[in-house]
Image: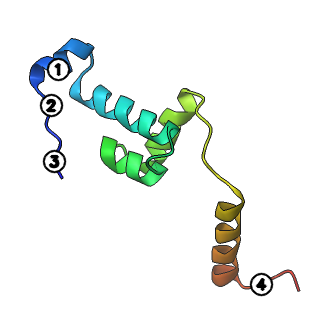
Amino acid sequence: MLLELNDNVIKSTGLSEQELRIELAVRLYEDEKITVGQGGTMTGLGHVKFQHELGKRKIPWHYDIEDLQADLETLKSVFGDRSK
């Protein structure tokens, strides 16, 4: 899907097109509508630089117990279960 905005709307914000993309992605991330990866894609920054942008704004990561469990399972599949 391509989202088009009138140039006058963009100009009225006082932001560049890229700044507006970042602002939109940050807000959507804050509202838990998109992931870090999606924000990175949406802004063209990539997920690491988008994470840095969130950090500069002191926006906490959305990371819950389910995310931790999924990460632990991934690590077990890569490195094996070393808890034994």
Q: Residues within 10 Å of mark 2 (few under 14, many from 20)?
A: few
Q: In terms of sequence position, does the residue under pointer 3 or pointer 4 come before the other?
A: 3
Q: Determine the secondary structure under disc 3.
A: loop
The residues bearing labels 3 and 4 have C-alpha atoms spaced at a distance of: 44 Å
Q: Marks 2 and 4: CB-CB under 8 Å?
A: no
Q: Determine the secondary structure under disc 1.
A: helix
Residue positioned 30% across, 34% down in the render: 21
Q: Residues within 10 Å of mark 1 (few under 14, many from 20)?
A: few
Residue with the mark numbered 4: 81
Residue with the mark numbered 2: 5
Q: Determine the secondary structure under disc 4.
A: loop
Q: Determine the secondary structure under disc 2.
A: loop
Asked if residue 44 can be seen in this view, the reply is no
Q: Marks 1 and 4: CB-CB under 8 Å?
A: no
Asked if residue 34 lies left or right of residue 69, the reply is: left
Of circles 2 and 4, the one toward us is 2
Residue positioned 31% across, 26% down in the render: 19
Q: Residue 73 occupies which quadrant of the picture?
A: bottom right
The residues bearing labels 1 and 2 have C-alpha atoms spaced at a distance of: 7 Å
Q: In terms of sequence position, does the residue under pointer 3 or pointer 1 come before the other?
A: 3
**Residue type, label 2:** Leu
Residue with the mark numbered 1: 9
How is the protein colored in the picture? Answer: rainbow
Query: Relative to 34, is 72 above or below?
Result: below
The location of residue 60, given as percent across then percent down, is 62, 38
Q: Residue 71 occupies which quadrant of the picture?
A: bottom right
Residue with the mark numbered 3: 2
Of circles 1 and 4, the one toward us is 1
Q: Marks 1 and 2: CB-CB under 8 Å?
A: yes
Asked if residue 52 lies left or right of residue 5, the reply is: right
Residue positioned 60% across, 29% down in the render: 58
**Residue type, label 1:** Val
